[in-house]
Amino acid sequence: SIDKNVVVAKILSVEKHPNADKLSVCEVTDGQNNYKIVCGAKNIKAGDVVPLAKIGAKLPAGEIKKAVLRGVESQGMLCSPIEIKAGDDASGIFILSADAKIGLTLDEYLNNDQSIETEITINRGDCLSVFGIAREIAAVFNKKIKKEIKDYSIKPKNIFPVEVKNPEKCPRYAGFIIKNVKVSPSPEWLANRLTNCGLRPINNVVDITNYILLEYGQPLHAFDIAQLKNKIIVRNAKKGEKIFALDNNEYPLDDEMLVIADEKQPVAIAGVIGGTPTSVTDATTNIFLEAAYFDPISIRKTSKKLAISTDSSYRFIRGIDIKNVPNTGMLAAQMIREICGGEIVEGAVDIYPTPSEPVKIELDINGVNKILGAEISVDEIKDILSRIRFFYSLHPTPYTLSVSVPSHRNDVKDEIDLAEEIARIYGYSNIKTNDRIKFRTNIPAADKMEKIIGRIKDIAVSAGFFEMVSYNFVSKEDLLKLKLKESKWEIKNPVSKEEPFLTTSLIPHLIKNARRNFNRGKKDIKFFEISKVFLEKEKTFFSGVAAGQLTGWWKEKPSAVDFYFLKGFIDVVFNELGISRYRLERSDSETLHKNQSAKIKISDKTVGHFGLLAPDIKSELDLKDLYLFEIVLDELADFTDFRKTYIPIPKYPSVERDLAIEVSQNFSADEITGVIKKEGGDILSDIELFDFYEGVQIKEGHKSLAYRMTFIHKDRTLKDEEVNTAIKKIISQLEKKFNAKIR
């Protein structure tokens, strides 16, 4: 706001300063008192109404104090627009309207309009203007708009050479020429309206383009024709090109950015900001007025790359009305002629090679009512469609309308969008509940996959894992480094240029997170993630990483994360899901260590892999030992059984026996376990691998495995002879099939 000591005053007289040729002595009044003011401006005369900053007024440049200038006391200061932040003009005093009320504070005078601040959702670019808001209010309250956008039916004419080299990014480009304009500060009413809307007045031509932007939502740009080299070219920038923009910054351009150029250089960043060399100045007489439609995605990318957000880019990103591009341009041209003088050259540039067709939607009236839980009649729906300017015709199918979406509503794509529009205008409060709408107080059971995911998350957290959530995007290099399957799906507008592909695995981001923790001194980590990956089909993966020490029980030494920790964890997961018939085989994953990894199979399906990160990858990424697992949850759904079967507590005592063997590393623990289970027979109730060793005390290429076996009979107490017989059979088969040595 402007200080209350700045008021509207009238100049009563202007006399030459007795001691200075370049100064004047003015007598002014605020309606109550007269003041003597020493002033150096040349644009004032008796009778002018001006802003007077009285003694004590606080302006951006400082506080006004009584001063003696060349022997004459000055009791205040007459202000230019720039001194009170009402514009950029510093050339003279701000001349106010002759009918301005004398004595009113300038703040009251300039800001006496009622301002309404709106928050527009990103899909409603059509409401980013006064006309757009009025159109919306008219629809809601069933009123008519007093002033429509006039259709000038302009015939395209080559009034200036224009070439559009990238019609995909610039589907429509219109231009007008206004000759012999006089560039000067804007009329007070225009400057005030822009100021009240948060825009800074610059000069009458630029202010008119901003006024049309606020009124109709169409960004415009004016070029000084004298500064354009021969023609306008709408093209992608060339690598290495730069532009000095209107915000006094120089921006480097790349070949993905759309620019407006002449034959020499870029003169504007399309849809974002103009360039200084061709801007409208006080010396401009002939202008080329641009009105265009630029692709929202292209403008968003450019705006984001250059970190520039302007009123123009804000609207282009949200989508403007391509149909009215030349109409709003002509409105601005006529306004320039009225305010700035000059003549509009007959005709206009209008390059529109592929006119857009309206979106057509078949609207099922019964379907809409079913969606909304309402009973809106056909006539009511027709009325609502008319109010929001959606054209319709009867469809051959009963209770169906063929609806055409107007050009300003680029957010409406299908029947669901139309249902939302109908509900909004009909009134949510008018949709009454009825007997056909049934509500259930009980929460419906989650589907099977949701239950699987929920159960797995509980198990993982109980085992000390922390859940992480990452983007589903990845770089090609990350997949190659980890020897994972390459992605076929590249995003056109990625969140990050470094990660433009939909991921085929959750492992890359899990490893990156592990590395960040290692770099911050965290040694013991356990992370998991459940998310979508994108192979030939979209699938849900459950993946994790673990490293360091496992927290031990009280007085128990902590043990290191290893292959068998992961195996035990996966056993728990599968048991909780009711999956018992799975087996482990040697993994063929290049991501994992060939001797410390396994793949999980159910029937003939491979449902996952787990193990130690391969040494060559570990070395290249400069990582510590890191254990990984990745399981395809979609493959588990058919085998999951959440039903629990009651097994009575055994009445008779069990017998435990330990067996340690030495075998070749070529045999997996799972293969050996399978033989033990088979030969142990019905009395072998449980088997646990409790020790594993590879090292100097074992023959090279061999490993030591120790199993704890539990024997029990459901009907009687077992005899030692029965257990010994079973053990002998087990040992015999281990020696025969694996050449095992008992330790």
Image (spheres, rainbow, N blue to C red):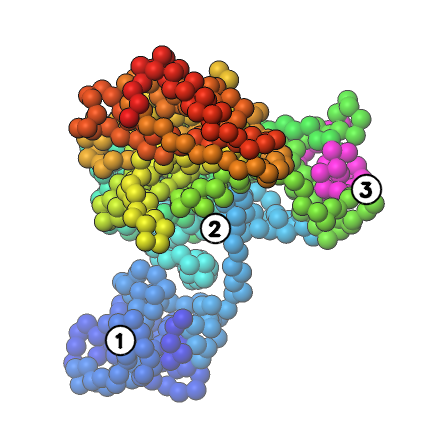
Coordinates of residue 334 in the picture (x, y in percent): 47, 44
For the residue marked with disc 3, what is the amino acid? Arg
The CA span between labels 2 and 3 is 46 Å
For mark 3, what is the residue? 436
Q: Nearer the viewer, residue 286 or 387?
A: 387
Secondary structure beneath label 3: loop
**Which numbered disc, 2 or 3, marks the residue that appears first in the sequence?**
2
Secondary structure beneath label 2: helix
> Disc 2 or disc 3, which is closer to the eye?
3
Left or right: residue 703 versus residue 682 is left
Local crowd at mark 1 within 10 Å, few (<14), some, or many (≥20)? few
The answer to whether any part of residue 246 appears in the image is: no
The N terminus, quarter of image: bottom left
Magenta highlight range = 366-394
Left or right: residue 55 versus residue 458 is left
Tell me, yes or no, whether the two marked residues, 2 and 3, touch with CB atoms within 8 Å.
no
Local crowd at mark 2 within 10 Å, few (<14), some, or many (≥20)? many
For the residue marked with disc 1, what is the amino acid? Gly
**Which numbered disc, 1 or 2, marks the residue that appears first in the sequence?**
1
For mark 2, what is the residue? 214
Tell me, yes or no, whether the two marked residues, 1 and 2, touch with CB atoms within 8 Å.
no
